[in-house]
Image: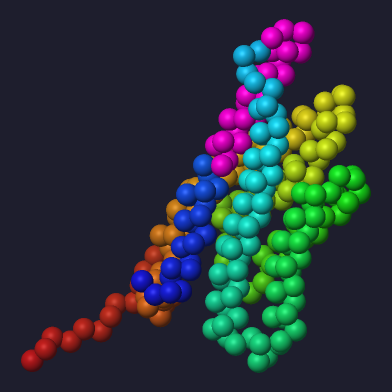
Amino acid sequence: MALADLLGILHPAIAVTFVFPVIGIVSYFAWQTRQRRLQTSDGGKSKIPPIVGNEHKRIGEWLCSAIVGLCLLGLAYPIGKNIIRKQIWNQNLFQVIFILLMFILAIVCLVLLLQAREKLWRGVFATLTGAALVILGCQEGVFRRTNEWYWSHYYIGITASLLIIFSVAILQDIYQDRSHRWRLIHTILNCIALLLFIGQGFTGSRDLLEIPLSWQESYIYQCNYSQKTCPTPNTQTPK
């Protein structure tokens, strides 16, 4: 397997070995936190330790960082491959610099989002982080499957990432809102995101089957995907 192919499987490898297990951990702590809150709402006692709420918040922030990082990694591979293959720096150096700045912007704004406490700044950094992901996703080289957006690994992944970013941005509001409106919004958004991540397991597996190795590309990309046919190689019987 060539280096380009090894780099291509980093995204799914990290998703399977790290991100998806952390999703399970966060979901477990979320359920435990809810159960403890229900059990103690009427002054009762719960065997669930009070630390579960803090652990859910802490690991949830790790998960947000991991998901954004995984999203950036998944975008960096096709964008970088397209830049190198077409040597875009010779044609449009500004575009290359702009793309690099978008990657930096996403990382910096995510770090600042996790540190911010004021509502205004949380909104600003969450918006900038999400905008950077969307802008990078619009770059040439990214396979979006727009004709099947409802079953696209890209669109589902971007949507799930934006939901997680927004969920982290409203964490402070949850603790300050006694009406539990923000808590309900947080729960609904994360339930939707969880379903989307389950969908990512299916779409990611499908896409891995469709992406050829680098040495196979010249032949595979001649295939007609709509008719599901490939050119028959010209074979000659040796004399």
User: Could you tell me which residue is drawn at 66 percent across and 87 percent down?
Assistant: 89
Measured as percent of width and height from the top left, residue 126 is found at: 80, 52
Please tell me which residue is depicted at 63% across the width and 62% down the height of the picture. Answer: 72
Kindly indicate the quadrant of the structure image that contains residue 171. Answer: top right
The residue sitting at 37% across, 78% down in the picture is: 215
Dominant secondary structure, magenta = helix
Horizontal side, residue 198 vs residue 221: left or right: right
Determine if residue 213 is in view. yes
Q: In this orientation, which residue lies closer to the viewer: 144 or 44?
A: 44
Name the residue located 57 percent from the left edge and 66 percent from the top edge.
143
Question: In the shown orientation, is residue 128 left or right of residue 195?
Answer: right
Any magenta on residue 236?
no
| Quadrant (top left/top right/bottom left/bottom right) for the C terminus | bottom left
Tell me where the magenta segment starts and ends, as one range: 22-45
Q: Position of residue 162 (x, y in %)?
A: 71, 50
- Residue 144 seen in the figure: no
Q: Nearer the viewer, residue 173 or 95?
A: 173
Query: In the figure, 153 relative to 176: above or below?
Result: below
Q: Position of residue 145 (x, y in %)?
A: 57, 62
